[in-house]
Amino acid sequence: MYYTRLLGITALTVLSGCGNDTDTISSDPQKIQKLPNFTGFSVSTAPLKKANTAQFTTHIKNGVFMRYHQHDITPPVNDSRETSDPSTTSSAFSGTNQQEQNVNEADRVKYDGNYLYIAANQYHNLTQPNESELPHYIRIMKRNNNGLIQAVKDLPTSSNEYAQQQLFLEQDTLVSISANSGWFSIFSTATIEPLSANSTAPNLNHTQFELNFADVTTPEQADISHTYSIDGQLIESRVINNQLYLVSNFRPSFSGFDLTNSQPETQLKNYQTLNDTPITHFIPTITHSQSGDSQPLFNADECYLSDTASDTDGYDSIMTITRISLADPSQQVSLCVNTEVEGIYASETAIYTHSTHFNAEGPKSVIHKFTINEQAFEYSATGKLSGHFGQNMRNLRFSEYNNQLRVMTSEGNQFDGFEHKLRILRQQGSELVLISELPNQSHPTPIGKVNSATGIVDEDIYAVRFVDEQAYIVTFQQTDPLYVIDLKNAEAPMIKGALEIPGYSAYLHPIGDSLLLGIGQEVADITIPELPNITQGAKVSLFDISDTSSPILLDSKVFPEAYTPAEQDYHSLSFVKTAAYQYRFTMPLERWIETGNTPQNYDWIKQNQLTLFEINSQTKKLAYIGSSHIKYEVTGPQQIPLIYGNEDRAVLHNDDIYYIHGNYIWHSLWQTPSANNGPL
């Protein structure tokens, strides 16, 4: 299913041509007398099959040709073809907030109880950037026994000025991943235009992401031991059982086409030229920066295609899952699928990739399951569903539980009506088979409130969270229905209870066995004018879910005119269980304050703060402790780096609060958060 690579040690055999397989189109252009009768772009919405070199070569080259000649060919698109409470054990300090307890996620801040690592950018420093140094680096900070923290080393990492840097910290290995946002998205197939005589070939395969591995056994002496660059666009990463998994997309480009006209003979010549190009041109590479060795990320005979793929269709994108050992980064394994992926969900034993494809019948989504353990790293099964997975924190719409995959899908809009469905899939052979869904014949009540005037569900889904045998779903248009879904009987899911309140929650977090925390916005219900005015802003809600048939809003806190990054990224929240029934968490806020009363002195000032809360799961109380505010001792606002709060983080260690904004830390105590010391 895959091959192991010792990059920089063992040279691989260079792939060339299409081999001698009888299924391939000959590399002799004289033998190609006419273009294939292309049937269109084919994405893998069916179970996958292992492809040989010839099949993979034909499929990827057909895809490249059709992408560059869409105006001339215009083929039809044919696609007919264990969750746990992340804060159950007490700890002295907080870690990265993540979906699954033993599936580690990358973030810009990591902490091990003694040393704190910050993904930093020179352009966010309070001093002028040093052009001789790399833009990206890692600040390594040491905490002493008194809670004081100081910088001990700056570790340079990446020269990619526009990349976003994320970190993993596993035992004594620190991993930095620097990647750009790129072409691939839920609407990616519509964003790349076909070429014409006046257009320039897009150099799509220049996109790379970088990996740096450092030994931090002694952080003061940390140094980069391995650096790699990989062609393509990074989609997601995870660390499971000391193995780094990277899921990426690669779309090859080709500069050998004659695009001056669209005559049949020119198209045939272009296809002949494409066919005569070695397959290695279309495969992403991995480069070891220290040695300069550059090798294919996978072999052409180690890829998968849809089992309905033919030699007259194709696709011009490659999804790769790469596994790298953190104990020895030169140990690498890759799997390839001739498709593209928009996101992933990962459990301890499997990685599920997903993508959505739009046609006249509506969105169709495909899920591929890949098994991961010490013995196996291989493709397992595929499922196909109607609908899509939203655009915000899509991984939370998935959950693996008791060898089943629970998934939340949506389709429609607020004008024609939404249809939200909870699906439960079970693997049978190479397929993820639907065993139940909600709504169903026995429980037809829609997920989302029906508008009495129009008779349609006009509420979209804002949050989903699976916790053991329940699912919690928030839909919203003007008010926030919180649905509790009973999943005890996987073949007969049902809505057990619902609660309707103003505003919405965009992120849900379980606290113990009976509480659910909601993070979102308070929004006035403009459809009921007689209601009192509601102060809008960031909202923290605590729900009692001990009686699943009747969830209760226990308490809430609203921060007027503020926004919290937690609505888009749950890594910005920090949680720690300090004792039995006692929890602490922090949440960053950002707001813009209007100043001045004349055009001459009118201005906006950005304010950033970290809010602190305590929860007692026995008394079921939510307590707001206070806030730590960002303050700079500078002579003018022009000296303050413009840093948005989306990447604000915090580390909680006993009573010490370390609020990270940009490259710097503001330190305070839990009891007196406003009396902070910074920037450090």
Image (tube, rainbow, N blue to C red):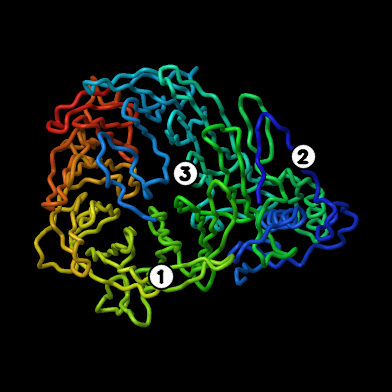
Q: Secondary structure at mark 1?
A: strand
User: According to the image, label 2 marks what residue?
Assistant: 14
Spatial separation of the CA atoms under disc 2 and disc 3 = 31 Å
Q: Amino acid at mark 3?
A: Ile
Residue 310 is left or right of residue 360, and the answer is right
User: According to the image, label 3 marks what residue?
Assistant: 240
Residue displayed at 58% across by 32% down? 228
Q: Position of residue 281 (x, y in %)?
A: 72, 43
Quarter location, residue 553: bottom left
Residue displayed at 19% across by 28% down? 668
Looking at the image, tell me whether mark 2 or mark 1 is earlier in sequence order. 2
* Front-most of residues 326 and 55: 326
Mark seen at residue 98:
none
Residue placed furthest toward the bottom: 441
Spatial separation of the CA atoms under disc 1 and disc 3 = 36 Å
Q: Secondary structure at mark 2?
A: loop
User: According to the image, label 1 marks what residue?
Assistant: 412
Looking at the image, tell me whether mark 1 or mark 3 is earlier in sequence order. 3
What crowding class fits label 1: few (fewer than 14 Cα within 10 Å), some (14-19), or many (20 or more)? some
Total numbered labels: 3
